[in-house]
Image: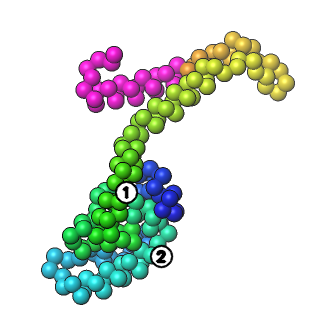
């Protein structure tokens, strides 16, 4: 996955990629390698940090890991205490500052999975409701009443799904009764 692909990918997909393919998920790798200990000397940490950066450089999902770290707000400019996605904490902080607008939009998009679901269901409903009822199967015309019955069943099911999602969203937003 490239950095550009990671920037346009939703959190769930990024996380699934990291969980499945990250080099640091191996049984022989200690996750403490990526974090500086509280009383750890700078020279010791530098050696471990270099090793962590080397490991990240060869990771097939480095870009996904970096994007998750940026969206999660990891790393601080004033502390050298971690490595994630091939960047140090200070590097993550600098990238987050430089990409603040893009990251805010990505985080908002990650939050609105229901909005995307509603969009998809609405399109499906529109297509189902306006579908042609003239059908043939194996060269024989299907009676319009049978097609309409199937079409109406599908439209009712989609409308019910949309209503369920909207009701749940409205309840979470504090609306007692849908307008």
The residue carrying mark 2 is: 58
Mark 1 and mark 2 lie on one chain; the one further toward the N terminus is 2
Question: Does residue 10 appear in this view?
Answer: yes
Most common SS among magenta residues: helix
> Is disc 1 surrounded by few (<14), some (14 to 19) or many (20+) residues within 10 Å?
few
Q: Nearer the viewer, mark 1 or mark 2?
A: 1
- Quadrant position of residue 94: bottom left
- Nearer-the-camera pick, 68 or 147: 68
- Nearer-the-camera pick, 3 or 138: 3
Q: Is residue 144 left or right of residue 55?
A: right
The residue carrying mark 1 is: 99
- Nearer-the-camera pick, 53 or 159: 53
What percent of the width, then of the height, locates residue 36?
23, 76
The residue drawn where x is 28% and y is 29% is 173
What percent of the width, then of the height, locates residue 175?
27, 23
Q: How is the image coloured?
A: rainbow
Vertical side of 70 occupied by 138: above or below: above
Q: Residue furthest front?
A: 98
| Chain part drawn in magenta | 156-179
- Quadrant position of residue 76: bottom left
- Quadrant position of residue 114: top left
The residue drawn where x is 38% and y is 77% is 53
Vertical side of 112 occupied by 31: above or below: below
What percent of the width, then of the height, locates residue 7?
45, 55
């Amino acid at each position: 996955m490239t950095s550009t692909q990671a920037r346009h990918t939703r959190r769930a997909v990024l996380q699934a990629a990291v969980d499945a393919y990250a080099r640091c998920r191996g049984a022989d790798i200690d996750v403490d390698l990526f974090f500086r200990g509280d009383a750890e000397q700078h020279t010791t940490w530098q050696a471990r940090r270099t090793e962590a950066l080397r490991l990240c450089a060869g990771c097939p999902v480095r870009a996904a890991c970096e994007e998750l770290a940026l969206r999660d707000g990891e790393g601080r400019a004033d502390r050298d205490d971690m490595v994630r996605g091939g960047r140090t904490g200070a590097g993550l902080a600098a990238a987050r500052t430089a990409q603040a607008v893009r990251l805010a939009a990505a985080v908002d998009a990650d939050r609105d999975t229901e909005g995307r679901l509603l969009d998809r269901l609405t399109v499906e409903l529109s297509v189902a409701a306006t579908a042609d009822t003239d059908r043939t199967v194996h060269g024989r015309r299907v009676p319009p009443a049978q097609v309409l019955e199937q079409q109406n069943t599908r439209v009712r099911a989609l409308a019910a799904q949309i209503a369920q999602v909207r009701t749940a969203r409205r309840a979470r937003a504090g609306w007692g009764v849908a307008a």
